Amino acid sequence: MSVLSAHELQRRIWPPDDPFAPNRIFVVPTPLPASIHNPSVDLCLGNHFIVTRSVRFSVLDACEEATEKTVSSYQERVFVPFGDKLVIHPGTFILGVTWQYIGLPSDVQAQVLARSTWGRAGLTVATAVVVHSGFLGTLTLELVNHGSAPVALYPGARVAQMVFQKVENGTAAGALSKYAGQTEPAFTRMHEEREELKQWAQIGEKVAFRKATELPEG
Amino acid sequence: MSEMLRIDRIVEEQAESLALLLSQVALRQSPSAYYDNLLGYLAGMCARIRDEVSQEIALSATTEEERLARDQLLVFCSEALRSIHFYVECFEHADELTAPAPMMQLLRRMGDRLSIAKPFLLKGSTEFNYTYWPVGRDLNRLAAGIPGDLGVLDSHFAVFSFPMSLKRDMLSSCALAHEFGHLVVDSKGLVEDVGSRLAPEEQRRMAEILERHARTGVQIDFEIATRVNYANHVLANWIHETLADSIGLLLFGPAHFYTFIYWVIPMGSYGADDVEHPSTSYRLGLMLRGLEALGWTDTVRIDGDDSWQQAEQMSGLPRPSDDYRFQAASECMALMEDVVWQVAQDCCGAAWFAPQDYTSAQDRMHGLLQRGIPPAELLVPGAQRFDPAHPVAILNAAWDFYRKGFPEWDSCFPSLSRCERRAFVNRLAVKAMEVAFVLAAQHQLESGEQG
């Protein structure tokens, strides 16, 4: 897996002949070729956020039947127009979204990284940093203020950058992940992994791991 | 006396609860300055009424006349407070107002191009339908009865409401073009314009038609005059409605028509004539003739599109009615259809969405939609730059893509159901419009253009 150079990135984003070339990387709005100096593309904050609010529940549990409902009462959508700001307080977590809509071909994957300008203010923008090949949509950013002062977030601010990597035998184009095709930040869908976790529970029953003190004698 | 005290208490409680609601709503996220202005105005009305109520309660009415006058004033204040409460409740959910933000932006831009500097808002509602609500006019009527100088709101301040269940459905939101058409008609006095453009001979014939139908089965002159007025009222409403349809078609092109046919046909609603609207079949016929006149028919007609064929069949359906008002209005509309269309065209002027605005970009936009990419920007041939796509072209491309059954998506996105595909197209259209507006603004800033 190799990082695409600035030249290769320009060629992928601005295919010289065919705008619908199968290996084109779509970044909408498209950055001008002259602005692609480094092997990365800057990503701006979009207008949509999900903020968390305190409600009376004990835990977000993917295995609980009511988790889907619980999550929607735990998180609230907020629209912040360009020119306005959303202040993120120390120690808090919100979901944002990139202004850019990304379409990756089957032979490219990407990583989302914070820009150091914002990192130095205490802000991290992404924890789930890998964007799989074939992805379509805006990227949900997990924004956390690790600093000790509130930070004002402005839609349009260049908070992250995307580095692209060539992948051999990547995902077939259009094989949408469960978060793909979104244009707003997406709530967690941890409840969709319930079946997977149930399988682990069944495995647990079969192998019957126990602490040493719980082992039957004999 | 006990009755009097009861009204006092009710009005006081009403005023207090309204003030509380206003203070709560004021804390919410504000979507626009118009919203703030309207809330401020409503708060002013509320405060004025509260003052008036306090003064009245403090005064001791001694005579029966004084008591009666005070009673009447308090009843009026109570009704006014109830109306204001209703308006404030409508604006309570500020978030809902921002739902189809690009659609709001598009309508604002159209308002600018048509020189309609009238404020308006979009509001989600739990109603089934899209509606036009001339709030400014209604509030001014209310304010006229409230003592003290409250100032006058822009009488064309309007609210367009849309069904909450469709707030993310950009395709259906094209129905707002019709509601916007109502605002244009009111702002520009187009119904009166239609009347003034009729030749004396046509006016005479119409008066004759109205009187002939009003006379059916009636002998007394006074009653006939009243019935003519009723029929005239229906006719004015129908002109308003058909003008709004025509303006919607001129500004949004076929997207407006698709919204209408995909809305009415699945419901099997053939919409009979009523006091506010001519029948669905008549409106469909008018829009089909409009599309033909504008040169759209060959561009957007899709062979095998059942909805289009059904629309054509529906437009030819007879509209039998026993109501003399509808018979009279139908006959008059047939006479003045060309004038209505001409008035709408003249009003829209250069702001209309022409077929070439779409056909020049149609293939490229479809190519992007097939790849699941928002058709927001179009590469300028021979130049290393993109131009923003026309927002109405985006809507039309999304509609066409949907009507064609999502070409290529069976292989690209086989796991998506038809419902999910429609939702995806809607998201792509919203994103494309958002980006197109921002790109256009950036281009303006770079070139130093105004507006």
Image: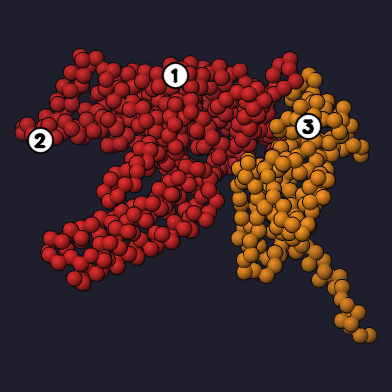
Chain colours: A orange, B red
> Which residue is found at the position 73% from the left and 15% from the top?
B382
Residue for badge 2 = B223
Q: Callout 1, which amino acid? A: Gly
Query: Chain for mark 1?
Result: B
> Does the image show residue A201?
yes
- Horizontal placement of B346 versus B218: left or right? right
> Which residue is found at the position 86% from the left and 34% from the top?
A39
Give the image location of residue B430, x and y in percent: 60, 37
Residue for badge 1 = B349
Give the image location of residue B42, x and y in percent: 39, 50
Marked residue nearer the N-terminal end (2 or 1): 2
Say few, some or many: other residues with alpha carbon within 10 Å of mark 1 (under 14 / 14 to 19 / 20 or more).
some
Q: Callout 3, which amino acid? A: Ile
> Does the image show residue B366?
no
> Which residue is found at the position 34% from the left and 41% from the top?
B152
Q: Quadrant of the C terminus of chain B?
A: top right
Closest to the observer: B304 or B127? Answer: B127
Give the image location of residue B70, x and y in percent: 20, 60
Closest to the observer: B352 or B137? Answer: B137
Label 2 to label 1, Cα distance in Å? 43 Å
Give the image location of residue B312, x and y in percent: 42, 25
| Callout 2: SS | helix
Query: Against A46, is B321 above or below?
Result: above
> Same chain, marks 1 and 3?
no
Label ID, residue A25: 3
> Which residue is found at the position 82% from the left and 66% from the top?
A203
Query: Chain for mark 2?
Result: B
Label ID, residue B395: none
